[in-house]
Image (cartoon, grey):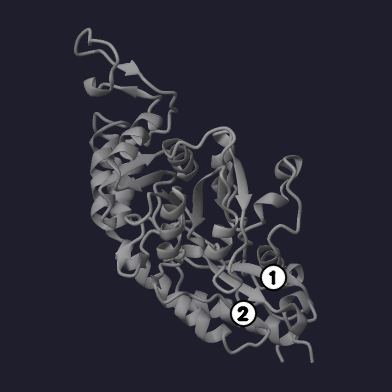
Amino acid sequence: MKKPAIEGGIPARETKIYYGHQYIDDADIQAVVEVMKSDNLTCGPKIGELEEKLCRLTGARYAVVCSNGTAALHMAAMAAGITEGDEVITTPITFAASANCALYCGARPVFVDIDPETYNIDPNKVEAAITERTKAIVAVDFTGQSVELDRLVEISRKHGLKLIEDGAHVIGTTYKGRANGSISDMTTFSFHPVKTVTGGEGGAVLTNDEMLYKKLLLYRAHGITRDEAQMEHETDGPWYYEQVALGYNYRMTDIQAALLISQLDKLPLFRQRRKEIVARYNEAFARLPMLFVQKEIPDSDTTRHLYILRIVPEKLTIDRKRFFEALAAENVCCNVHYIPTYYFPYYEKLGFQKGLCPNAEKLYAEMLSLPLYYGMTDADVESVIEAVTKIALYYEKK
């Protein structure tokens, strides 16, 4: 049996492979250069072009691009009318912004447990958590797998709630043949460099509701409008505008938009390669009883942003931390997504305590995010598989 590098063995590879990395080609660079040479670095024509492209991609009627995924969530929460005293249901297995967007509006997050096999929020537990104060559900498409949208749409309509789909991971995924982004009341995207497509930073909110769309436009740009239909006073002239709401500077630059327009041209390639890597990982790791492979619902044709590998502690002589360290010694640099949000000191001070979501807490103790990105070669993928397999077999409980 091969000895892991952490035990003095030979690493699976000589150079490091990281859990995520952007892919930028000459077309992307040229798109940015063209904007840099133009008259519009921000608030120019590329913003509308990108929004139209996102609508064509998803089937949504409206798209509002913004500075980042967190801004998108905040804008969506405001457009949903979330305010002080409200409750917003979400999952703890996500980046903190999914819950923070409720806090930004003076509301309180309510954390609901996950399905132990798919790792997405459990719709049955969502319905059980609804009170007279519940205003919205922020459902996270964790790893890029769609949440059970039929159930969540049904629940939200039954109880008069807004369904905000945190789709930071989900671009390129379809649910029952429909692209994610066109189904929920609002869907937010993130374009951080580790995501499937990137603008360096950037975000978007997609909706089919014209009233929500108009609110999102206001919240993106200081609450300021030049639309006479939204103004309260008569216009003084062509220069005139009014602030009619309290908004923020959440605008995207044309530089970012140009990069994203180019990146979206490659989405089919990115999607296919990620699916190939996930299939190879699943094939290799399903053979190892000390590892658990994330389950996928048949309704979701998933473009995976993250590959979560879960150890089965009772079948190993090491814990997740030691497994993580052993992979690092093999030059396979993993990550962990995510620390349950209510574990953080800020949330502890708000009164949240461990024990709220047992499935989520167990997952956190057992999971690793393996490398997954378009630029991985077949040799990279096999190096990851070799490292994981070596460690799992060496530390298998006999």
Circle 1 is placed at which residue position?
Answer: 366
Q: Are marks 2 and 1 in contact (CB under 8 Å)?
A: yes
x and y, in percent, of residue 247 in the image:
43, 27
Residue type at mark 1?
Answer: Glu
143 vs 209, nearest the viewer: 209
**Measuring 32% from the left and 39% from the top, which residue is drawn there?**
213
Alpha carbons under labels 2 and 1: distance apart: 10 Å
Mark 1 Cα shell of 10 Å, populated few (<14), some (14-19), many (≥20)? many
Q: Residue furthest top?
A: 236
Label 2 sits on residue = 292
Q: Is residue 241 left or right of residue 153?
A: left
- Residue 114: which quarter of the image? bottom right
Residue 226 position within the rendered picture, expressed as x and y whole percent measured from the top left: 26, 21
Q: Residue at x 70, y 44 (%)?
A: 347
Q: Give the position of the C terminus as an image quadrant.
A: bottom right
Quick check: can you spot residue 167?
no
Q: Against 43, is 183 above or below? A: below
Query: Residue 49 appears at what percent x and percent y?
Result: 23, 43
Question: Residue 339 sits in which quadrant?
Answer: bottom right
Q: At 76% across and 40% down in the image, what residue appears?
A: 349
